């Protein structure tokens, strides 16, 4: 059974940092790009960052220079280092596994809450 489990969310003051982790299991995630999405209350889910199995990454403009995505293919882990957090970063953050073969299933974690408040 394929599972994505996020952890590391929490409460932080503006300007602070958090590191999200996502543990992937149940398949060979070298065949997947791994990504972080977020959804704030009343808003649609949006892409935050994505990283290929080769290590190439892309970021939403709103987080460029503040967030860093990384992955450990041996451990089947993906991380999101979030620095200089702002109140508008408050959201539920989801881990996503997107297969290179689009006929395969895409997977989502259950989400972890990040709240930035002063």
Image (cartoon, rainbow, N blue to C red):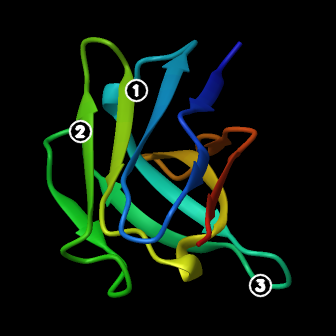
Q: CA distance from mark 2 to mark 1?
A: 8 Å
Q: Is residue 42 left or right of residue 16?
A: right
* First reached walking from the N terminus: tag 1 or tag 3: 1
Image-quadrant location for residue 91: bottom right
Coordinates of residue 114 in the picture (x, y in percent): 62, 55
Quadrant where the image shows the C terminus: bottom right
Residue 100 visible from this viewpoint: no
Is residue 83 or residue 50 the one in the foreground? 83
Is residue 2 or residue 35 the one in the foreground? 35
The answer to the question of whether label 2 and label 1 lie on touching residues, with beta carbons closer than 8 A, is yes
What SS does tag 3 mark?
Answer: loop
* First reached walking from the N terminus: tag 2 or tag 3: 3
The residue that disc 2 covers is: 53
Q: Is residue 29 left or right of residue 4?
A: left
Quadrant where the image shows the N terminus: top right
Q: Which residue sits at x=85%, y=84%?
A: 42
Disc nearest the viewer among 1 and 3: 3
Coordinates of residue 100 in the picture (x, y in percent): 39, 48
Residue 84 is marked as none
Is residue 110 or residue 17 the one in the foreground? 17
Q: Which residue sits at x=51%, y=22%?
A: 24
| Mark 1 nearby-residue class (10 Å; few <14, some 14–19, many ≥20) | many
| Mark 3 nearby-residue class (10 Å; few <14, some 14–19, many ≥20) | few
Q: Which residue sits at x=70%, y=45%?
A: 111
What SS does tag 1 mark?
Answer: helix
The residue that disc 3 covers is: 43
Residue 29 is marked as 1
Q: CA distance from mark 2 to mark 3?
A: 29 Å
């Amino acid at each position: 059974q394929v599972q994505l489990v996020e952890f590391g969310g929490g409460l932080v003051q503006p300007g602070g940092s958090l590191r999200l982790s996502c543990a992937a299991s149940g398949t060979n995630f070298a065949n997947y790009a791994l990504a972080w999405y977020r959804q704030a209350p009343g808003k649609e889910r949006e892409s935050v960052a994505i990283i290929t199995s080769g290590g190439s990454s892309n970021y939403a403009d709103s987080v460029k220079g503040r967030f860093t995505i990384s992955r450990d293919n041996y451990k089947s882990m993906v991380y999101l280092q979030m620095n200089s957090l702002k109140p508008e970063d408050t959201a539920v953050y989801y881990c996503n596994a997107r297969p290179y073969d689009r006929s395969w299933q895409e997977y989502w974690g259950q989400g972890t809450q990040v709240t930035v408040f002063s």
